[in-house]
Amino acid sequence: MRGVIMHAPGDVRVEDREDPTVIEPTDAVIRLTATCICGSDLWPYRGVEPVDHTLMGHEYVGVVEEIGSAVQTLQVGDFVVGSFVVSDNTCEICRAGFQSKCVHAEFVAGTIGTQAQKARIPHADGTLVATPGQPDPELIPSLLAASDVLGTGWFAAVAAEAGPGKTVAVVGDGAVGLMAVLAAKELGAERIIAMSRHPQRQELARFYGATDVVEERGEEGVAKIKELTGGLGAHSVVEAVGTQESFMQAVGATRGGGHLGYVGVNYDVQIPGIELFFAGIHTLGGPAPVRRFLPELVQLIWDRRIDPGKVFDLTLPLEEAAEGYRAMDERRATKVLLTL
């Protein structure tokens, strides 16, 4: 089969890989229908994360081709959406709703690599969710979004306790930030402030439910949020970038007693303890337990109540993955869908 391998920073190639097979009785092998490039894939691309002939990709939808003898919830031929973290969905941590910290947790990126034609998914019952039937082609981008960015944005909004009567501020206008706007809207937030300087992303944020757009960043961004909220700050803030400036902006924009949900993969972010201490806020974040939300999100998409697939603004064949990475790195694309 063909798959994306990142040899070194900036060096993305599509090469032949061995076809996956069932190894453990809990495995499933799926033929991917679509995959995509994530903003977090840019960390190794830019040399921030180590990379050396790494199997790329962790977002995926497809059709089950083979299952192990212990798989109970799936059948060959099912169309499935999978989480970017493998989980058994039965351990104590999974049952508490944090499948991304499962005792059997394994990141799909680097070990499995789903920017490929096929993938072996361990703990298939706990990682994959079958759709109610074979989806119409126009639903596939939205179902693919559920595999990571929608589920991550949704977790961020839940962690920030977005809901009725709340003002939600979203720091970051990438795919995850835009999905957090969508989630905040679905969760009933009264006011949603999207922080963005990008006209096309501002437009999409408004489509997903943003009531206000703030272009200022850093301390100026915090001041603007407070100006819009009577000097208090937002009840709920989502951090979906992962830089020093964005994280401290998110902390500063959260009102006393408010909630910060952070999902931006961060490197070299230093949080001054005294600032966090005196902020007096709740914080929750990290790798999103997408599997917790997948059944609900799949149904919302299936019923056409939400349309997260609009976040994909460039579609390329798998063989042109290198161009997709360049487009996202240069901010010519918000999120790239790869067809198979």
Image (spheres, rainbow, N blue to C red):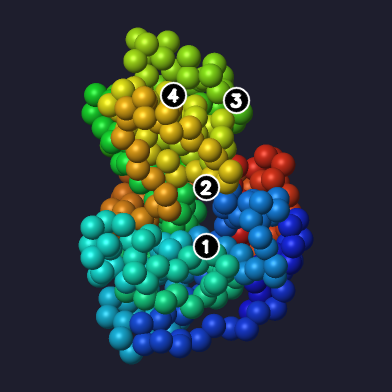
Q: Are marks 3 and 4 in contact (CB under 8 Å)?
A: no
Name the kind of residue labelled 1 in the image.
Answer: His
Q: Nearer the viewer, mark 3 or mark 2?
A: 2
Identify which residue, 280 or 287, lies in the foreground: 280
Q: Are marks 1 and 2 in contact (CB under 8 Å)?
A: no
Q: Is residue 57 left or right of residue 322?
A: left
In the image, farthest residue toward the front: 274
Q: CA distance from mark 4 to mark 2?
A: 19 Å
Element at label 3: loop
Quarter-of-image position of residue 262: top left
Q: Crowding at label 1, few (<14), some or many (≥20) Cα neighbours within 10 Å? A: many
Q: CA distance from mark 1 to mark 2?
A: 15 Å
Q: Which residue is mark 2?
A: 265
Q: Nearer the viewer, mark 1 or mark 2?
A: 2
Q: Are marks 4 and 1 in contact (CB under 8 Å)?
A: no
Quarter-of-image position of residue 123: bottom left
Quadrant assignment for the C terminus: bottom right
Element at label 2: loop
Q: Which residue is mark 3?
A: 197
**Disc ID at residue 252:** 4
Residue 239, x across and y down, in percent: 46, 36
Q: Crowding at label 4, few (<14), some or many (≥20) Cα neighbours within 10 Å? A: many
Name the kind of residue labelled 4 in the image.
Answer: Gly
